[in-house]
Amino acid sequence: MTIGSLRGIVTIKEESEMILEVAGIGYRILISPTTFGTVGQVGEETLVYIHHHFREDNQVLYGFSARTDCLVFEALISAHGVGPSLGLAILSTHGPKELSKIIANEDTEALCLVPGIGKKTAARLIMELQSKLHLAEIATIGISSQTTSQTSTDTKDIREALTGLGYGNEEIYEAMKDLPAEGDVSELLKLALRELATVS
């Protein structure tokens, strides 16, 4: 039997796990910081979507407050070399919609912001996820191939310009994450620099 979701009372809630009591049984569920911030508080009834992970020696429940997060998590851990811990780390750094854009734009540097992922691993992951998974569809984002290609080029141009100005990956990521999807590169670069100025 595989558990797909649980509805019950939160009895314990910690940063990396929670216990959900359902019909007198307390289920220990591992969660990400993102899920921690969105599920119900202790004493409240809440619904948690579950990935039921089977290992040789035990079973582990991973919980998500949104079905989309659970689907993307399952897509991630189906990729070679991505276990549940790394899958949670990826989703804790990039939400499903943001992750789908990163994969569509082949933005390896953004993926490298996840602890434990280097450039080679990021490039391999993006290639594998593009070829066998449809994270963009899971995250309900419709991006045409032509728009995606142009967005990817613009993103790389802006990133290269900011790198040339001496900014680090994390600073560039923060400056670019809220930029409009489309627009003139020079105007988008100005917006990114303005954002960097407010942070510093």
Image (cartoon, rainbow, N blue to C red):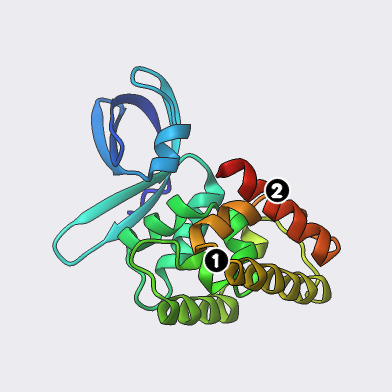
Residue 135 visible within the image: no
Tell me if residue 53 comes above or below residue 19 in the rendering.
below
Residue 37 visible within the image: yes
Going 38% across and 55% down the picture, which residue do you hit?
A: 88
Which of the two residues, 50 or 162, is positioned nearer the viewer here?
162
User: From the viewer's perspective, is 33 left or right of 68?
Assistant: left
Going 47% across and 82% down the picture, which residue do you hit?
A: 124
**Residue labelled with disc 1:** 166
Disc 1 crowd rating (10 Å Cα; few below 14, some 14-19, many 20+) is few
Tally of marks: 2
Quarter of the picture holding the N terminus: bottom left
Name which residue type carries label 2: Arg
User: From the viewer's perspective, is 196 left or right of 56?
Assistant: right
**Residue labelled with disc 2:** 194
Residue 195 locus on image (x, y percent)? 66, 47
Q: Mark 2 or mark 1: name the one nearer the start of the chain.
A: 1
